[in-house]
Amino acid sequence: MKNLITILFVGLISFAANAQEKVAKIEFKETTIDYGVIEKGADGVRVFEFTNTGDAPLIITDVKSSCGCTVPKKPEGPIAPGKTGEISVKYDTNRVNPIRKTITVLSNAETPTVALKIKGEVIDPSKTSVLEKKSTSVMNQ
């Protein structure tokens, strides 16, 4: 009877050790997207692509933005090992200013928190600077 209990105990320990080895890993194609200089009202949607390089299903539990002007969208279901997924980010391009935002991804991956960044600048082409409006110098008038 002791031998049977010992064999079962050793079996459970080895099973638990094997179960712990399988882990999801998330690798992004790029962690920063540069919008460049875009016009007010332009398409503000960009996509971060990633791959589950681990050997367990990847579950993204939450995606948060550092600002209400940026709306991220996470994948709905688990991402199988070797498969790819996308996190889309929509920036409100009606705000004319430089873009410097962080999107935080939370998951069951080996590295559970990943910071993604977007950058760029939104300009309003209908508003030019005072210097650009002057075609002739005051001295020439």
Image: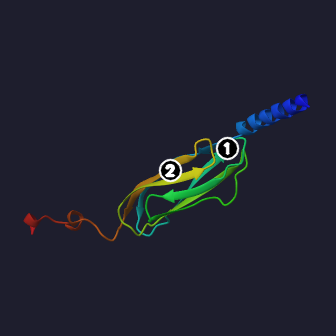
Residue count near mark 2 (Cα–Cα under 10 Å), binned few <14, some 14–19, many ≥20: some
135 with respect to 43 (left or right):
left
Total residue callouts: 2
Q: Going 13% across and 64% down the picture, which residue do you hit?
A: 137
Whether residue 33 is visible to the viewer of this picture, yes or no, is no
6 with respect to 49 (left or right):
right
Q: Which residue is mark 2?
A: 116
Q: On screen, 50 above or below 12?
A: below
Query: Circle 1 — which element?
Result: loop
Query: Circle 2 — which element?
Result: strand
* Residue 70 in the image, given as x and y percentages of width and height: 47, 63
Q: Which residue is mark 1?
A: 24
Q: Quadrant of residue 53?
A: top right
Q: Residue furthest top?
A: 3
Please identify, in this view, whether the residue under mark 2 or under mark 1 is nearer the observer. 1
Q: Quadrant of residue 16?
A: top right
Q: Going 60% across and 59% down the picture, which residue do you hit?
A: 74
Q: On screen, 113 above or below 42?
A: above
Q: Residue furthest front?
A: 1
Counting residues from the start of the chain, the first of labels 2 and 1 encountered is 1
Nearest the viewer among 8 and 38 is: 8
Q: Considering the image in quadrants, where does the N terminus appear?
A: top right
Q: Amino acid at mark 1?
A: Ala
Nearest the viewer among 8 and 17 is: 8
